[in-house]
Amino acid sequence: MTRLYIFADEAGDFAFKRAPNVSRYFIVCTLTSHSCAASDEIQELRRQLAWEGHRLGEYFHATTDVQIVRDRMFELICKHNFGVQATIMEKSKADPKVRPSNHRFYQYGWYYHFRFGMAKHVIPNQEILVTAASVGTKKGQAVFTDAVNGE
């Protein structure tokens, strides 16, 4: 039986208006791989960069890390085979029934992402492990997790 690892994250906010400092889009994104070798190597890279004295935040982030850290990260990930799928939603065009609450909008975004963006990457009887980034507080995380699970 084959395994598929899916790492999920999103970008954007839940404001449905056009205004300064409000994102126009909400994006859900997944990275798929049949191995966790890249994540193991990323952890090792983090340790190595720390030993070399580079300033690191809580996580790697291409927009805020220093150039040498970004260069080393991109060099590492370019050696690996993985897929990236993104669903980009223009929030101002969302149907009103989709946005009565943040978790409803979140649920629709992930549903459509998995239904139309991810389904073709999954084969019958395949084991799948989905790891999602955290969203806000623990209470908020529970609400969003329930929304994605359809509860």
Image (tube, helix red, strand yellow):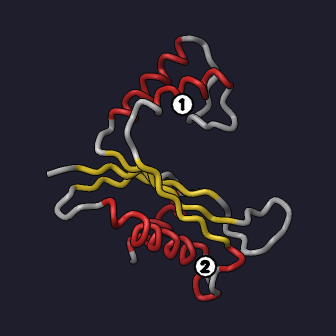
> Mark 1 = which residue?
74
Question: Which residue is more in the foreground, 77 or 5?
Answer: 77
Amino acid beneath label 1: Phe
**Res. 22 in view:** yes
> Image check: 144 left or right of 67?
left
> Mark 2 = which residue?
101
- Tags 2 and 1 touching, CB below 8 Å: no
The C terminus, quarter of image = bottom left
Answer few, some or many: residues within 10 Å of disc 2's Cα (few below 14, many 20 plus, some between 14 and 19): few
- Mark number, residue 134: none
Query: Which marked residue is nearer to the observer: mark 2 or mark 1?
Result: 1
Amino acid beneath label 2: Ser
Q: Earlier in the sequence, mark 2 or mark 1?
A: 1
Task: List the single residue furthest toward the top.
Answer: 52
> Which of the 4 quarters of the picture holds residue 120?
bottom left
Question: Which residue is more in the foreground, 75 or 62?
Answer: 75
Q: Which residue is drawn at the image coordinates 23% and 61% (left, top)?
A: 123
Question: Which residue is more in the foreground, 112 or 139?
Answer: 112
Residue 110, percent from left and from top: 47, 68
> Which of the 4 quarters of the picture holds residue 63?
top right
Residue 16, percent from left and from top: 72, 75
The secondary element bearing badge 2 is classed as loop
Separation of marks 2 and 1 at Cα, in angstroms:
37 Å
Task: List the single residue furthest toward the left.
Answer: 1
Residue 113, percent from left and from top: 46, 67
